[in-house]
Amino acid sequence: MEAEANRFSSDLLLPPYLVVPKIVRREPCIDLVSDIGKSLIQASQPPPFV
């Protein structure tokens, strides 16, 4: 818990051009998880009538 807070505060001390790539690097994983979640939701719903 404390280590997490220390890492976060050290991120705040870094210049933005170093912090932003870190955030961007985390994003694809979040996108992937939400994409999987969306496809699971769509798969569990019956297809709409056309």
Image (cartoon, rainbow, N blue to C red):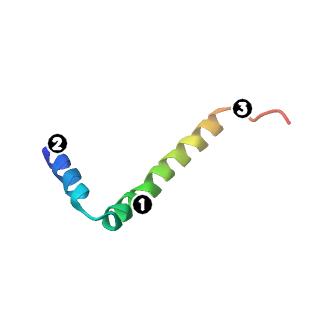
* Residue drawn 20% across the image and 52% down it: 9
Q: Position of residue 44 (x, y in %)?
A: 63, 34
Q: Around disc 2, counting alpha carbons within 10 Å, would you say few (fewer than 14), some (14 to 19), or many (20 or more)?
A: few
Position of residue 39 relative to residue 12, above or below, is above
How far is disc 2 from disc 3 in space, using C-alphas? Answer: 43 Å
* Residue drawn 25% across the image and 63% down it: 14
Q: Nearer the viewer, residue 39 or 26?
A: 26
Task: Tell me the tag on residue 50.
Answer: none
Counting labels gives 3
Upstream in sequence: badge 1 or badge 3: 1
User: Which residue is at the far left?
Assistant: 2
* Quadrant of res 27: bottom left
Which residue is under mark 1? 24
How far is disc 2 from disc 1 in space, using C-alphas? Answer: 23 Å
**Secondary-structure class at tag 2:** loop
Position of residue 40 relative to residue 32, above or below, is above
- Disc 2 residue type (three-letter): Met
Which residue is under mark 3? 46
Which residue is under mark 2? 1
Q: Position of residue 28 (x, y in %)?
A: 47, 57
Upstream in sequence: badge 2 or badge 1: 2
- Disc 3 residue type (three-letter): Pro
User: Which residue is at the far right?
Assistant: 50
* Residue drawn 23% across the image and 51% down it: 8
Look at the image and tell me in which quarter the N terminus lies: top left
